[in-house]
Amino acid sequence: MVESNKRRSRRRSGFQGVVYGPMSPLRPTMGPLWRKKNPLRAKEVKEFDHTKAGVKGLVDCGIKAIPKFFIQPAENLTKLPSDASFMHLQVAIIDLKGVGSDRRKEILEEIRVASETWGFFQVVNHGIPNDVLDNTIGGIKRFHEQPTEAKMEWYSRDLREPVRYYCNGDLLVAKAANWRDSIMCQYADDTLDSQLIPVICRKSISECMKNVHGLRDMLSELLSESLGLRSDYLASLDCMKDQTLPDLTLGATKHCDPSIITILLQDSIGALQVLHQDKWVDVSPVEGALVINIGEYLQLLTTDRFKSVKHRVVARRVGPRISAACFLCPSTENKSKPYGPIKELVSQVNPPLYRETSVDEYMGQFTSKGLDGSSSLPHFRL
């Protein structure tokens, strides 16, 4: 297509933004496990992918039954128990107001505890206006609610495309697909030509990213200091430069993020759960809050001091769940550079647990297995 060639000629590697689109309240029901080498499944998946319609297209067509390759194994459908003994558990909500004052020590301690024990926390008074957050959710929703024909020109599995729309990044390798669509905007080293973003969500996504840069720099300092390092330590590693935005979905199987950290904006439906003390705990939406979670790459750098924990999105019957996730990773220039445990955090008492690895190698391991619920870190363990 002419438009596709035009977009590619102006491509820049960089910030990757992912958005998972509006879904139907249909829920996959339990069924058999589908194996990667099942030829019938492979044929059905390719035929579905070729339509470029995504799951929203299935909903718009009024399907009565969900295709078998979307049916999740029983362990992915387990409901959160109603045992009141752990219902008090809650991801920390950290108020960043006064971060430049005497409250900084208190904030650093809250971040340290949350990063070491939960791997997740929410932040409020983070500096991004509520209207920017609301407009981001609105822009994502508008894109996905367009007719299939309007979105098809953006549909691609070409990782070189800086902006693309697709259904499940691991659709072709996963045992079972998730009920989600995505639009991804990749910002390499904070750079993406805004003219490459679909007009219907261009302004909202561009404005969101301008604001995220400031929060990223603040979190880089706070995470560094909470590790007992100088405030510019993580920034000096150039490990939080490339970014990945939006996640809009009704369901995502358990996984850990392949990032340094992830900044997540979720709508009022929520549905995000974190695995803590062998229990799935809801991360309840808080107006104006952003969810921060530690990625596997930061766990590797900190030698398990900061934890990347499994999380998932459960399907709700109340309608489409929309969120925007910004994944922070090492810069494009450093994608082949080996990163290893931070030397200041390593000693005879606390030896390194992982070997050095590059972003390219790590992502190759992550994408080869899909969202199968397992961590990529054991592959790099010493």
Image (spheres, grey):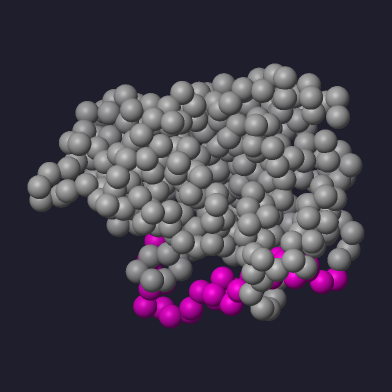
Residue in the image at 30% along x and 57% along y: 117
Q: Is residue 67 left or right of residue 183?
A: right
Nearer the observer, 153 or 207: 153
Residue 17, compared with residue 56, is above or below; it is above
Q: Which residues are magenta?
A: 64-92
Point 56% across, 55% down: residue:
370
> Residue 33 at x, y = what percent?
64, 74
Q: Quadrant of the N terminus?
A: top right
Q: How many marks?
A: 0
The picture places residue 7, in percent across and down from the top left corner, at 75, 24
How far from the left and from the top, in percent, is residue 310?
Answer: 44, 59
The residue sitting at 86% across, 66% down in the picture is 63
**In this view of the protein, which residue sits in the foreground, 27 or 253?**
253
Q: Is residue 15 above or below residue 48?
A: above
Asked whether, in this view, residue 191 is left or right of residue 19, the answer is left
Magenta stretch: helix, strand or loop mostly: loop
Q: Toward the viewer: 153 or 338?
A: 338
Q: Is residue 102 magenta?
A: no
Residue 113 seen in render = no
